[in-house]
Image (cartoon, rainbow, N blue to C red):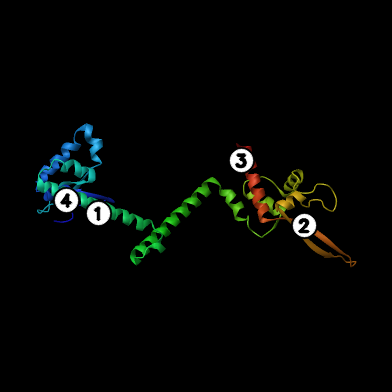
Amino acid sequence: MNELVIMHDQQAVTTSLILAEAFNKQHKNVIQAIEAKIEPAENSARYKRMFYEGIYTDKKGEQRKMYYLNRDGFTFIAMGFTGRKADEFKLKYIDAFNRMEEQIKKTYVIQKQDSYMITDPVQRAKRWIEEQEEHQVKLDEEVRKNEILQPKALFADSVAASHTTILIGELAKILRGNGINIGANRLFQWMRDQGYLISRKGTDYNMPTQRSMNLGLFKIKESTITHSNGSVSISKTTKVTGKGQQYFINKFMKMNETAIG
C-alpha cells in the first residue's frame, strides 16, 4: 500500500480512497459514510472542516468524487470499522498521522529559522530567499504607512542627522514647500517672538538665544571682512542645523494640523 497519511493544504490527511483500500471497503460505501455525517444541516458546520471534497481520475480516465479526511474526520469514520484487522489499521493510521504531523512541525521550524542556522544548503538557500522577500514586504509596508500618515514629517526626519546648515530664509522656503504659508521676514519675527532669536536691537540682534543654542537648533557662522581702510570686522550669520530643521518643520506641521482641525 501507499502511505496511509499524506500532506494536503499544509496538514496531515488521508483520503476516502486510501481508507477504502486499507480497510477493504468499497469506496462508494466510505463516501456514503462521510456524507451521512456532513449532509444533515445540524452537522454541516461541525463536520465539514473535517472532510474536504476532491476529485480523482479512475482507471477509465473519468473524474470521480473523493474526500480528504483530517485526523478528526478519520477518527469519526474509522470508529465504525470493527474487527482485529481494522484495529491494526487504526493503530497504523494513528502512527502515520503522528509521523506526518511531526514532519510538518520540523519543516515549519526549518522554514522559520534564520538561514544561517540551517545546515542543508538547499533549505538554507530557500530560507534566505524567503527572508529577503519578507524583509522587502516589511520595508514596503513601512514606507506605505509613512507615506500615508506622515509624508511631510519624513522629510524632517531625513535632515535630522544632517551636518548641512541652512539660512533661516531657506528654511522658510522649505516650510512653504510643506504647505506652511510663511516668508523669511515672518519666520524671523516668529522666532524672535517665541524666544529662539534675540529680539533686542544691537550687535546680537537675530542671533540665537542661549536656549536655542542649548537645544542645538542653530549654529553661528563667523566671517572675517576686510574693509577698504584696512580695518577688519567679524560678520555673524545665524544658520539652522539639521536638528533645527527637523524641530521647526515638525513644530509648524503640528501647529498647522491644529489650526486645520
- Name the residue beneath numbered marker 2: 237
Q: Residue at x 62, y 48 (%)?
A: 178
SS type, badge 1? helix
Instruction: Say which quarter of the image contains residue 165.
Output: bottom right
- Name the residue beneath numbered marker 1: 99
Q: Is residue 44 above or below residue 245?
A: above
| Sequence order check, earlier mark of 1 and 2 | 1
Real-space CA distance between mark 4 and mark 1, rounded to the nearest whole angstrom: 25 Å
The kind of residue tagged 2 is: Thr
Real-space CA distance between mark 1 and mark 2, rounded to the nearest whole angstrom: 77 Å
Near mark 2 (Cα within 10 A), the count class, few <14, some 14-19 or many ≥20, is some
Q: Position of residue 216 (x, y in %)?
A: 70, 53
Real-space CA distance between mark 1 and mark 3, rounded to the nearest whole angstrom: 60 Å
| Sequence order check, earlier mark of 1 and 3 | 1
Q: Residue at x 23, y 38 (%)?
A: 47
Instruction: Say which of marks 4 and 1 sits in front.
Output: 1
Please indicate whether residue 6 sits to the left or right of residue 25 in the image: right
- Name the residue beneath numbered marker 3: 257
The kind of residue tagged 1 is: Arg
